Image (tube, grey):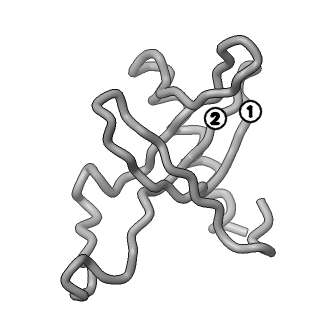
Amino acid sequence: MSEEFGPDFITVTDEDGNDFELELVDTLEHEGVTYYAFFPAVEGDDETGEPVDVDADDEEFGLVIMKSIYEGDEELLSTPDTDAELDEVYQLFMDRFFEDEEE
């Protein structure tokens, strides 16, 4: 993935109507499905102007994995269907991330 033009951001809406901004980290194809790895976008300051302190252990700031699905001609993003699918794709992304670090 080229960083030539800067990071890619998307806004997704969950089933409760909450909007989240995500930064695209990587994309992969696995068994005919396109998967995307995102991190929640963290702005430099909160509403009060104070720097945002991100806790790496906070589950809201972990890797978000979504897959591309189609409803008719419309492409949508969805979460993996099972924990096994999520675990498998998560491991594929981790292998890719750490492979890049080893080079």
Could you classify mark 1 by the number of other residues whose Cα lies within 10 Å: few (under 14), some (14-19), or many (20 or more)? few
Residue 69, disc: none
Which amino acid type is shown beneath numbered disc 1?
Glu
Residue where numbered disc 2 is placed: 35
Residue 83 in percent (x, y) is at 39, 21
Element at badge 2?
strand
Tell me what residue is drawn at x 39 percent, y 75 percent. Answer: 43
Answer left or right for 101 relative to 1: left
Q: Which of the pair 15/61 is nearer the observer?
A: 15
Q: Residue 18 occupies which quadrant of the picture? A: top left
Give the camera-side residue of 97 and 25: 25
Q: Position of residue 82 (x, y in %)?
A: 43, 16
- Res 68 → quadrant: top right
- Observer-nearest of 81 and 71: 71
Quadrant including the C terminus? bottom right
* Residues at discs 1 and 2 in contact (Cβ within 8 Å): yes
101 relative to 18, above or below: below
Q: Earlier in the sequence, mark 1 or mark 2?
A: 1
What residue is drawn where x is 45% and y is 55%?
A: 21
Looking at this rendering, what residue extends furthest in the top direction?
Answer: 72
Residue 29 is labelled as: 1
**In the image, is residue 84 above or below residue 51?**
above
Which of the 4 image quadrants contains residue 51?
bottom left
Identify the residue shown where x is 54% and y is 59%.
Answer: 23
Gap in angstroms between the C-alphas marked 1 and 2: 6 Å
In the image: residue 86, left or right of residue 9: left
Q: Amino acid at mark 2?
A: Tyr
